[in-house]
């Protein structure tokens, strides 16, 4: 129901991973190439990066319509970026607080997918009433160290859920594949995780479904999740 992207490596500009690639998040907001659910991602967007802590810029408008952010993005540099464009789940509100990335003050987190809020614990910490925000609050409450277990448990309670998570804390990225696509590109200056490739480089790795992905200074690690087929 959305497209997201994470960067970990040498400091780069936000524009270089969001706007500049031929099929970057900007293009994915109106013409995604690998999206299975929905056709456009025009219900908001968010970009988060680390600069002595997590910083965010979010909107309930289409990314292609925000010329002010596009003009600033080349000046924003970070070694850890989490960005997303949103296609709202039917019935969910369209508001800036519903756009990823969500944060607990330490992590930036995006959810690509859908989940029945009835299977999630009630929490007052969610930034919005949308399913992704409630899910993010639950993950923060459990701790990102338990991300794999949390996703497997929720997936068992809601068999129709799609639970692709992407999160960063400034020094690492964590992600899950559960019902939707995720790709990795290991560049000389860092690693990109993305719902779909932002160019046609043959080095993009298609991450198998139901896996936990960890990216750190030591490289990229894949771990099958409980319930993987």
Image (cartoon, helix red, strand yellow):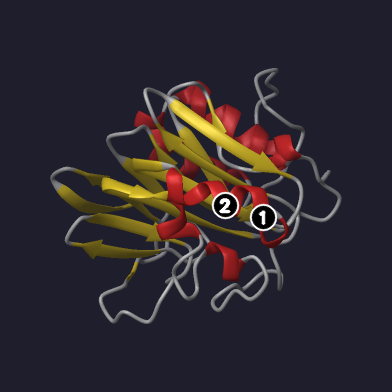
* Observer able to see residue 112: no
**Mark 1 neighbour density, 10 Å: few (under 14) some (14–19) many (20 or more):** few
> Mark 2 highlights which residue?
71
Task: Tell me residue 86's x, y (percent).
Answer: 67, 55
Q: Quadrant of the C terminus?
A: bottom left
Q: Which quadrant of the structure image shows residue 207?
A: bottom left
Which numbered dot is residue 202?
none
Query: Which of the pair 118/187 is nearer the observer?
Result: 187
Q: Say which element carries label 2.
A: helix
| Quadrant of image for the N terminus | bottom right
Q: Position of residue 108 (x, y in %)?
A: 48, 35
User: Is 98 rendered above or below residue 39?
Assistant: above
Residue receiving disc 1: 67
> Marks 1 and 2: CB-CB under 8 Å?
yes
Specify whether 91 is left or right of 223. right
Residue drawn at x 20%, y 56% is: 189
> What's the distance in space between the residues labelled 1 and 2, CA to CA?
6 Å
């Amino acid at each position: 129901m959305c497209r997201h992207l994470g960067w970990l490596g040498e400091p780069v500009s936000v524009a270089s991973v969001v706007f500049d690639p031929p099929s970057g998040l900007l293009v994915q907001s109106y013409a995604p190439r690998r999206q299975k659910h929905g056709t456009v991602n025009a219900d908001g967007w968010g970009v988060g990066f680390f600069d002595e802590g997590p910083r965010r810029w979010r909107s309930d408008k289409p990314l292609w319509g925000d010329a002010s952010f596009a003009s600033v993005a080349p000046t924003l540099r970070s070694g850890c970026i989490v960005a997303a464009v949103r296609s709202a789940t039917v019935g969910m509100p369209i508001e800036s607080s519903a756009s990823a990335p969500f944060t607990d003050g330490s992590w930036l987190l995006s959810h690509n997918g859908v989940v029945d809020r009835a299977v999630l614990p009630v929490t007052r910490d969610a930034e919005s009433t949308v399913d992704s925000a409630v899910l993010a609050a639950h993950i923060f409450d459990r701790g990102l160290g338990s991300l794999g277990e949390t996703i497997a448990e929720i997936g068992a309670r809601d068999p129709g859920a799609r639970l692709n998570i992407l999160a960063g804390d400034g020094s690492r990225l964590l992600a899950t594949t559960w019902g939707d696509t995720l790709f990795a590109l290991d560049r000389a200056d860092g690693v990109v995780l993305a719902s779909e490739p932002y160019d046609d480089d043959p080095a993009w790795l298609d991450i198998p479904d139901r896996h936990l992905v960890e990216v750190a200074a030591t490289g990229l690690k894949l771990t099958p999740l409980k319930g993987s087929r």
